[in-house]
Amino acid sequence: MLSINKITESPEETISLANSLAGSFLDGGIYGFVGDLASGKTTFIKGLLSGLDFSGVANSPTFTLINEYNAKCRVVHMDCYRESDINRWIQLGILEYFNSNDLILIEWPDIIKPILPDRIKYIKFSNIDKNKRRIETI
């Protein structure tokens, strides 16, 4: 069971924390990343991908909506910030992703809450100051 309650004091620490926790993220798991803009969600995901042996460039899917990565397992990174139309997400195949064995990482999951599966686990990011943040499972 994934359990996090940490404070990081730099983006590098956030990446390192995620990297160290990569083995706790399960294939077929669905994780929602909640928090304000610039609270470390994408930075954490970059560290997580590194911990899953992804060696390429990981970018936020803010404009593409969905990025797929081949790592130790297939990782699907979604960002709902710019698209609130649930029907559009359904047209993009989000329900098929939810029923796959892929590791699903969703930024801004509350935007699509009505279609999220019950098994989603949430990680909350809270800004404390410019580089310091609390990262915790909720």
Image (cartoon, grey):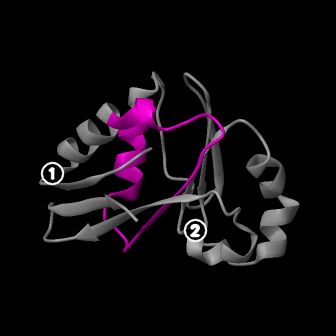
Q: Secondary structure at mark 1?
A: loop
Looking at the image, residue 126 lies above or below residue 61: below
Left or right: 18 with respect to 82? left
Residue at screen point 43% across, 29% down = 23
- Magenta residue check for 70: no
Where does the image place residue 106, in percent across and percent down from the top left?
57, 57
Q: Secondary structure at mark 2?
A: helix
Q: Which picture quadrant has residue 91?
A: bottom right
- The number of callouts visible is 2
Left or right: 127 with respect to 49? left
Residue at screen point 33% across, 40% down = 18
Q: Which mark is residue 109?
A: 2
Q: Which picture quadrant has residue 63?
A: bottom right
Where does the image place residue 62, in percent across and percent down from the top left?
55, 61
Please provide the residue range marked out in magenta. 21-49
Q: Residues within 10 Å of mark 2 (few under 14, many from 20)?
A: many
Q: Which mark is residue 138?
A: none
Q: Which amino acid type is marked by label 2?
A: Pro
Where does the image place residue 71, in percent across and percent down from the top left?
55, 24
Residue at screen point 80% across, 47% down = 99
Residue at screen point 66% across, 51% down = 66
Left or right: 93 with respect to 51? right
Using the rendered image of the protein, determine whether residue 36 is visible from the camera's viewpoint.
yes
Using the rendered image of the protein, determine whether residue 81 is visible from the camera's viewpoint.
no
- For disc 1, the marked residue is 10
- Magenta residue check for 23: yes
